[in-house]
Every structure is written in structure tokens, then in C-alpha cells.
Image: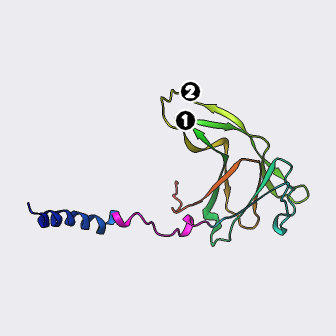
Amino acid sequence: MKLPQLCHLAAVPLAFTLLSFNASAVSPPPPTGLDAPMISVSSMNANNYAPVETVKMFPAPKKGMVQHILTLPKLENEADYMVEIQIGQTQLVDCNKHGLNGQLKELTVEGWGYNYYQVDEISEGPSTMMACFELAKKEAFVQIPDELTLRYDSRLPKVFYLPEGTELRFRTWKADSTYQYSK
């Protein structure tokens, strides 16, 4: 075959690939709705603590602790939403399943009745003991056993006190289905 014919044969599949859906799928659309970062987050430790008006009734973080404040924006129908909270650390792990030890406690601000959440300490937890032959370690979020699912309520921020080096991760859930009935 001649060179121009080979170029023509190679150009057709290349053009098809570039113009196909798969090629355009590498740039996802900007996040909207629940995928958009709608919850604002702030965190303060004992050194940089400055009371904010909306959370001044909560105690200041103690030395070695970080106060995490999740402020939820007002939504039209908040009864359809939930917030899932996970607490842990990002660690290098092997092929085993890893966990952390720690207890999530729900406490109340005296005189106000507002709830906040606290983990006093986190330590290495259980792990499976599989042999991981020369498999590279990877970063993964390792969490404490307690998970928290809260009703979405934008009237008051969600406040957490966690040991330094601990991460709080969260996501929003929305009920899309209607109620089913059994009579």
C-alpha cells in the first residue's frame, strides 16, 4: 500500500475516536445540585480559636483538639435530606482492611440544649492479616467504627471536636423516591 492510503486508513479511526462520546467524556460537567460543595466548613484549634457568632455557645477546643464546624445552607425541603458523617484518618495501607479505635460521643451545651459531637482519642484499630506479597501501599481513608447520619437542619451548625490529625468527611443524601404503603 502506498503511504497516502495508509494515512487515510489511519486517519478515519483516529477521527472517529476523537469525535466519539468517549473522547468528550474525559471532561465532566461542573457539579450541580447535591454534587456541588454546598456545606461550608471551618476548623479551629486551641491556638487559632476565634468564637464566631453562630457557634459562640459551644466550648472552645482544648489543647490537642480541633473544632470542626459544618454550616448547612437553607434548602427548600430539608426533610428530604440527610448528612452522613465519617471520622478517621488518611493512611498508607496495604491490601488488608484497616480500622481505627475511637468513640464518637454526643454531648449537650449546658444551658442551651444544643448537641455537639466529640471523639477524645483515636488509636490504631483492627486489621485483617492477609499476606500482601509485594503489593504497593496506597492512601485510603481509615475510619472509626461509629458513623453518624443526621437529619438535615440548617438552623444550627453541626459542631465536632476531634483530635489533631483526624479528618471529618461528610456527604449529603436526598430521598428521591416517594413513600410506599402497606395496609
Does residue 27 belong to the magenta stretch? yes
In the foreground, 40 or 80: 40
Say left or right for 25 vs 77: left
The residue located at (52%, 63%) in the rendering is 176
For the N terminus, which image quadrant?
Answer: bottom left
Residue 94, labelled with which disc?
A: 1
User: Can you give x and y, in whole percent of width and height, for residue 96 in the image?
Assistant: 54, 33
User: Can you give x and y, in whole percent of width and height, for residue 143 in the image?
Assistant: 64, 43
In the foreground, 119 or 4: 4
User: Can you give x and y, in whole percent of width and height, for residue 114 in the image?
Assistant: 82, 58
The image's colour scheme reads rainbow
Residue furthest out toward the right = 111
**Residue 94: quadrant of the picture:** top right
Residue 119, labelled with which disc?
A: none
Please, is residue 135 above or below residue 165 in the view? above
Q: Is the magenta stretch mostly helix, strand or loop?
A: loop
Please, is residue 2 above or below residue 182 in the view? below
Q: Residue type at mark 2: give it.
A: Met
Residue furthest out toward the left = 1
Residue 129, labelled with which disc?
A: 2
The secondary element bearing badge 1 is classed as loop
The residue located at (34%, 64%) in the rendering is 23
The local crowd at label 1, few if under 14, some if 14 to 19, many if 20 or more residues have their Cα within 10 Å, is some
Which region shows up in magenta? Answer: 23-37
The local crowd at label 2, few if under 14, some if 14 to 19, many if 20 or more residues have their Cα within 10 Å, is few
Q: Residue type at mark 1: give it.
A: Asp
Pointers 2 and 1 in contact (C-beta within 8 Å): no
Q: Which of marks 2 and 1 is nearer the N terminus?
A: 1
User: Can you give x and y, in whole percent of width and height, for residue 115 in the image?
Assistant: 80, 55
The secondary element bearing badge 2 is classed as loop
Say left or right for 161 vs 133: right
